[in-house]
Image: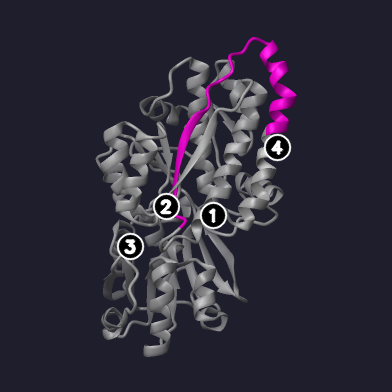
Amino acid sequence: MDQRQATHRPILTAARALVATALLGGVAALGFAQPAVVPIGALLDFTGPLGEFGPAHRDAAELAAAHLNAAATEVFGGPIIELVFEDAATSASIGIDRARKLVDVDGVPAIVGPLASGVAVAVAEAVTAPAGVLQVSQSATSPLLTIVDDDDFLFRTIGSDALQGVVAAQLARGEIYPEYAFTRAATMYLNNPYGQGLSNAFAAAFEARGGTVTAQVPHPDEPQPTYAAMLEQVFAGDPEVVLVMSYPGQATVFLTEARDLFGFTNFQYVDGSKSELIIEAMGAEAVEGRLGTAPGADPSWGGFVAFVEAFEGAYGQRPPLPFMDSIYDAVAVVGLAVAKAHVDGTPVSGAVLRDNLRQVANPPGETVGVNDFANAFGLLQAGSSVAYTGAAGDVVFDEFGDVITAVEIWRYAGATIESLMIRTPDQIPHD
């Protein structure tokens, strides 16, 4: 157990216990049946190239679960979900194995995650869809998720990279900052659904704007000791800027090689390469002022503000990494779907949660937001419908289980990462 886990988990546990003690007797006296606690899988990455994200995403997920359970104790007389964490290790094979354990051993009707698109697709095809288990990823942004044959069991609470690719191309071509404009670009991308989808989306949008993509160079999922030969391909066409469509575990190695072997540091980054580990590996001076894109919430969005305030209250710091808002939303909508099943008197299953998901997230319905779950549960109990609007934005699932979220433009500055601008969905061209 890491120090942050040891320090903060008791805060949330104690909060749940206090709420339960104070409210259980009064609610039970009203005659409401106390709900069964439903195990929900949380398939995150604590090791592997995305290992940096696991602890932070666990904290955000536990915050959502604490909010849901405190509200359920107030309204229903007891908690409704318990998160069961497993490590996907940013590996399709390990993710499939851990997902099977969650389904077959822990009996979960729903899994939140995984983080990586390639792992999310593999888990959906091999485990969750065949088993009839709901899967909601907070960060799998590949356009491929839209077309996976998943029998409507695969959802996500973050927008597709079809949107991020367009914004990245707008940025690189000077449509956003005229002083930041290039005509020749290359990509270095992970050879998985995430990297392929984002590289292709960027290339199409960049060339549609009159730019030339000199190379799209894939690299293996498995971290390599050197990427020199691949970097030679990247630089062969003399690009002015190179898009880094990778994870920190790989990018920290090839970015350092690009600087030391080729004298090149003019990179543009994306969500997967938005990481303090890159600052540590490259040095703050080497990345100073470099720009990037990432799916992200508007910092003035009410749900995001509420999430940040709640996170700071529980953990003593602002959310440090991408997709923490969207994992909060993923746990929230699953919890709302569980609550609806409880109110309806329906046994919880993956199919029931799948069918409930749009009913608790999409309009019409009374709008409920971050940590507004007692109100949501009361409305459900009164026979009203609810529509959840989340920390990362509106959570309106289309027929493919996709949502549309904003795209952030950010930069490395002063050894930190700062947000510069939010491109809202209506500001993003549909190329």
Q: Who's the residue at 47% across and 49% down the image?
A: 405
Residue hosting label 4: 15
Residue hosting label 1: 55
Asked if residue 38 can be seen in this view, the reply is yes
Residue hosting label 2: 115
Q: Label 2: state its secondary structure.
A: loop
- Neighbour tally class for label 1: few under 14, some 14-19, many 20 plus, Cα within 10 Å: some
Q: Amino acid at mark 4?
A: Ala
Residue hosting label 3: 195
Q: Earlier in the sequence, mark 4 or mark 1?
A: 4
Q: Residues in magenta?
A: 17-46
3D distance between C-alphas at marks 4 and 3 = 41 Å
Q: Are marks 3 and 2 in contact (CB under 8 Å)?
A: no
Q: Amino acid at mark 3?
A: Gly
Q: Earlier in the sequence, mark 3 or mark 2?
A: 2
- Given this view, does label 3 or label 2 mark the residue nearer the observer? 2
3D distance between C-alphas at marks 2 and 1 = 12 Å
